[in-house]
Image (cartoon, helix red, strand yellow):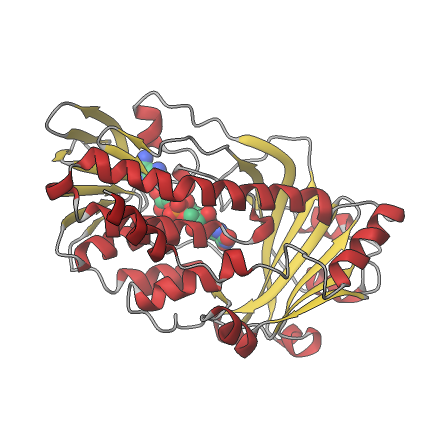
Amino acid sequence: MHIVVIGAGVGGIAVALGLQQRGLDVSVYEQASAVTAVGAGVIIAPNSHRLLTDEWGIDAVPGGVQPPTLHLRRWQDGTTISEQQLGAVAVQRFGAPYVAMHRADLIDALAAGLEPGTVSLRKRLTGLVQDDKGVTVSFEDGRVERADLVIAADGTRSASAAALGESTVARPSGFAAYRGFAPKQLIAEIGESHNTWLGPNQHFVHYPISGGELLNFVAIVPTTRQETEAWSSPGEVSDVRRAFTGWDPRVRRILDATEEVTLWGLYDRPVRDRLDLGRVVLLGDAAHPVLPFFAQGASLALEDAAVLSALVVDAPALGLDRVLSAYSRVRVPRIRKVQDASFRNATMFHLPDGPEQQQRDAFLGDPASPSPLRANAWLFGHDVRDDAAAARADL
Ligand code: FAD
């Protein structure tokens, strides 16, 4: 069985590695001229970090930082709303660490395990045609390839899904995100925690990455424009500074110390009931773009990759259709749950100051309340390889 993966992002590289480690023949095609040139901080939570270690053999991604706490703060003075212990406590509680890392370091660590020549760069998919025996994949440069299975890991506006006539229209959230880095000196001043500052209609997140060399931040603001979904579109530093006027001096310090920012629109799309379209199967953002308010975009892509590679190995014996439908059965309910939680955080995080906000703060700050940000055993504690094993047993 020859498998073609479209897209060498987090999900594409991870699934290729999982398939290769199981002895399958896989090629990855990526439109960019380099695999890791762009991106910033991503959170790899315990639910996906355990996969990095146990599935792909990566104990620690170089430059990964374990924040000691996840701190929710009030926007104007930093008052603590809630504080969750991470670091060693996360490992003890969930069996794996909560790690902030540069997206490029994560992809590099995964790609290092691939056999040389697996990834072809500057290969932009332009067409997919399926027949009874396989899929014909065409690229912009004229190359044509046959595959038994195509894994579409080509991001939010999946060209693979579009080539099969699927809608890739994403739902604008009404929010946009500025991303940037502040110099490492600010980490000593402000601390190593993962901090989320909640304010009316907007919020601000920061944590160190790259071994503490960079303070990564994301500033979420309301927007009525259709901002681009491209990750590397430049934004105006003066705009984001203006948006956070009057916020705690620590937030202001980070923005004042920043020279450039990128700006990207935040979108999601309800996930389909089936992730397979015949011999083409969707994975990661191509299947389910998710708002970043639960920091699970990369983690979900890794979960998809672990489950799909565990199931596809049985395709020659059990039939492609059966293993792909098992993949959908296992993944769709969990993806929906995370998408919903991310969506709900958009409302909860952005309440205007007043009685509802006070109620929220009391709820989030009460260690006994079932806050989705604290009582997250269902998310962090879950091992999706158990789902894959259960699905295989049923086939
Ligand atoms: P993606 O990471 O989006 O990867 C999709 C890949 O497919 C890309 O490499 C893209 O170039 C390739 N591709 C797209 N169309 C084609 C085509 N027609 N032919 C061939 N290849 C194609 N998330 C964060 O939380 N923080 C970040 O800083 C961050 N930076 C990012 C930077 C970039 C450049 C990208 C593409 C994504 C970034 N993300 C970031 C998103 C995050 O990586 C994803 O939400 C998550 O990891 C899911 O990954 P994925 O593999 O499904 O998709």
Residue 305, horizontal then vertical, whole percent? 32, 50
Q: Residue at x 59, y 46 (%)?
A: 342
How many discs appear?
A: 0
Left or right: 287, with 195 as reference point: left
Q: Residue at x 35, y 51 (%)?
A: 387
* Image quarter in which the C terminus is found: top left
For the view shown, which residue lies furthest in the front direction? 394
Q: Residue at x 50, y 40 (%)?
A: 336
Left or right: 154, with 248 as reference point: left
Can residue 199 be seen in this snapshot?
yes
Whether 278 is drawn above or below 95: the answer is above
Whether 151 is drawn above or below 273: the answer is below
**Residue toward you, 172 or 263:** 172
For the view shown, which residue lies furthest in the top direction? 165
Residue 136, horizontal then vertical, whole percent? 16, 29
Can residue 9 be seen in this snapshot?
no
Left or right: 237, with 271 as reference point: right
Residue 384 sits in quarter: bottom left
Residue 371 sits in quarter: bottom right
Left or right: 385, with 95 as reference point: left
Residue 9, horizontal then vertical, whole percent? 36, 50
Q: Residue at x 35, y 25 (%)?
A: 162
Whether 188 is drawn above or below 167: the answer is below
Residue 278, horizontal then vertical, whole percent? 24, 28
Residue 143 sits in quarter: top left
For the view shown, which residue lies furthest in the right direction? 354
* Image quarter in which the N terminus is found: top left
